[in-house]
Image (cartoon, helix red, strand yellow):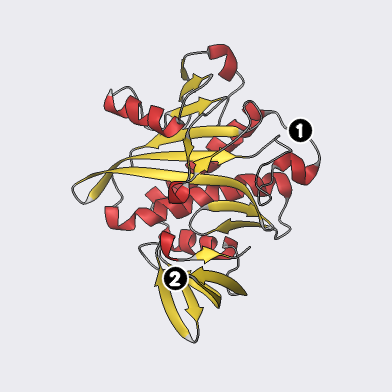
Amino acid sequence: MNVTKYENQVEALFPQTLFTGRQVVWLPECASTNTEAQHLIGENRATDGCVVITDKQTAGRGQRGNRWEANPGENLTMSVIWRPTFLPAQDQFLLSQAVALAVHDWASALLGPDGALRVKWPNDIYYGNRKLGGILIENTLSGAMIQHSVVGIGLNVNQREFGAHTATSLAWVTGRPYALPTLISRLLECLERRYLQLRSGRLAAIRHNYLAALFRYQEQHAYEVEGRRLEGEIRGVDEVGRLIVRIEGQLRHFDLKEISYVL
């Protein structure tokens, strides 16, 4: 493993992987691990599978332009750099599905298959109606193909108090603390396993597993659409990642900012 900076902080990382996490950049504090990862790519200093980890993120980014907030030293905040040059830009939602499933696999091993752990479209991780983690993927394109992907992951682990009532953590659910280095190693293994599944072309399995884990799939719930509160049933996602919801007897396809869950 090629460790850059603060080797003593990551000496407990021993992921059983081929390339993901073989180069680790650990930072005691940074604005955003995704931003740091982009800098490494721009300076040609990141290998395929490089991981950037921080103890304290001061300006983490989430979906819809939201900020990701986490107490320093209590949670997992990291970014993985991959080079999925095999993946057409039009299929980039498959990468999002694979990553979400990897995190779901990881959390399921810790919390058990009780059905409460779900993937909330597009790639948030929920336990019940509360958010356990979030994912933000930023892709760089070269023509019609993806050149680099920066996969930002934030997971609530040992934090017990939150500003938002819709947040939760592993410790909150189970009532016990966790050693972060061991969790990181297991997460990197889950990520690479799903990434290799994607790279080998097992796309039908990824799509099937994603629907099986999808939050509120084939259930009737309330949503906010164009300022209106409507009842709808999630029927799936299309090939470009839009959410398919049956509303008022019609199937409608929604982009990220066009529909909101009522929790």
Residue 262 image-quadrant placement: bottom right
Numbered disc in front, either 1 or 2: 2
Residue under the image location 51 percent in, 40 percent down = 153
Residue under the image location 61 percent in, 73 percent down = 221
Q: Image height check: is 233 above or below 130?
A: below
On the image, numbered disc 1 is attached to which residue?
A: 177
Residue in the foreground of this view, choosing between 260 and 239: 260
On the image, numbered disc 2 is attached to which residue?
A: 226
Residue under the image location 59 percent in, 33 percent down = 76
Secondary structure at badge 2 equals loop
Residue 19 image-quadrant placement: top left
Quadrant of the drawing holding the C terminus = bottom right
Residue farthest to the left? 143
Badge 2, how many Cα within 10 Å: few under 14, some, many 20+?
few
Query: Residue 252: x and y, percent?
Result: 42, 76
Q: Image height check: is 37 above or below 250?
A: above
- Amino acid carrying label 1: it is Pro
Can residue 19 be seen in the rendering of this structure? no
Can residue 104 be seen in the rendering of this structure? yes
Secondary structure at badge 1 equals loop
